Image (cartoon, rainbow, N blue to C red):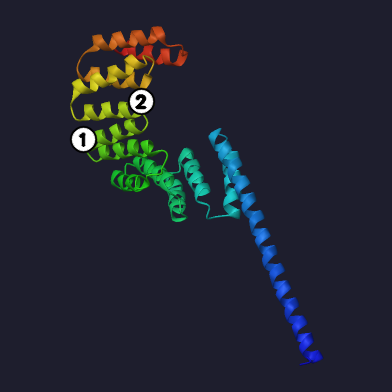
Amino acid sequence: MIKSPLCRLSAVIFTAMLLAGCQSSAQKQISEEKDLNRAKLHYQIGLDALHKNQMPKAFDELMKAEAINPNHADMLDALGYAWRLRGNLKKSESYYLRAIHAGGGASAHTNYGSLLLEMKRFEDAKLQLEKALEDPRYKNQFVAFINLGDAQLGLGDPDAAILSYRQAGALNPRQTLSRIKEAEAYVSNKRYNYAQALYETILRENNLNRAALEGLIRLLALRNDSGAARGYIKAYIEKSTSELDRAWATDELDKLR
């Protein structure tokens, strides 16, 4: 069967339209990929500036990334942290909520939970941190457990807090923050002997652990044992190589005289 010239012309036009459509789709895809790459670059530069505490540059780069790709969960999480550092907690919360809505995982829930702790919204914080811990693949589970312990302590449940701090210690035994927090929980539960033993254990491992010494000094003040406090502070002053830390310890010693 011989096709008419009109049929052949229609076929040519249809083929041309298909090719134009494919080219347009391909060009659009290439353009979108370029935009995503630009957004990623601005995000990486902004994140680096954030880590270096270069806040104006961090905001500039992260906001550029947001303008290009407003649904990038990690970028929104970073802006949440940046606004928190700047002291605007409501703005920070709005970005963390957007990050979670955009698919932010355990890290976003942990960071939001930490913000809620600062805002004294302990029940909300507990829910976010429990959500973070639902993911067994989360690499920083010990951070979520420490924050969860803080939320539980804020809710008046020191026993639950102690269990969370211990879980954090089991997951990352190299850090001492969870044990210091555990000692604080014992103090709040009026288990002073156990708290003092834990502080002293930490200081035997590292006699320059200022956070442990601060906690121990507060505890010894509760126990009216200024003599022991003076001994620990003097030992710290003798061994510390930090001028600022020695000045802090000297001020603490003066308070006991």
* 130, 136: nearer the viewer: 136
Residue at 45%, 41% (x, y): give it: 84
Q: Is residue 78 above or below residue 20?
A: above
Q: Residue furthest front?
A: 1
Mark 2: few/some/many CA within 10 Å (<14, 14-19, 20+): some
Q: Are marks 2 and 1 in contact (CB under 8 Å)?
A: no
User: In the figure, residue 198 lies in which quadrant?
Assistant: top left
Left or right: where does residue 187 sit relative to residue 67? left
User: In the figure, residue 23 lies in which quadrant?
Assistant: bottom right
Give the spatial CA distance, label 2 vs label 1.
Answer: 19 Å
Q: Is residue 9 above or below residue 57?
A: below
Residue at 30%, 35% (x, y): give it: 167
Left or right: where does residue 40 sit relative to residue 253? right
Secondary structure of residue under mark 2: loop
- How many marks overall? 2
Q: Position of residue 245 (x, y in %)?
A: 42, 16
Q: Is residue 7 visible?
A: yes
Amino acid of disc 2: Thr
Q: Position of residue 192 (x, y in %)?
A: 19, 22
Left or right: where does residue 5 sit relative to residue 103? right
Find disc 1 in the rendering and name its residue. Answer: 159
Secondary structure of residue under mark 1: helix
User: In the figure, residue 205 lies in which quadrant?
Assistant: top left
Q: Earlier in the sequence, mark 2 or mark 1?
A: 1
Q: Position of residue 20 (x, y in %)?
A: 73, 72
Of the 4 image quadrants, the one containing the N terminus is bottom right
Q: Give the numbered dot on residue 224.
A: none
Find disc 2 in the rendering and name its residue. Answer: 176
Of the 4 image quadrants, the one containing the C terminus is top left
Q: Is residue 217 visible?
A: no
Q: Is residue 254 above or below residue 84?
A: above
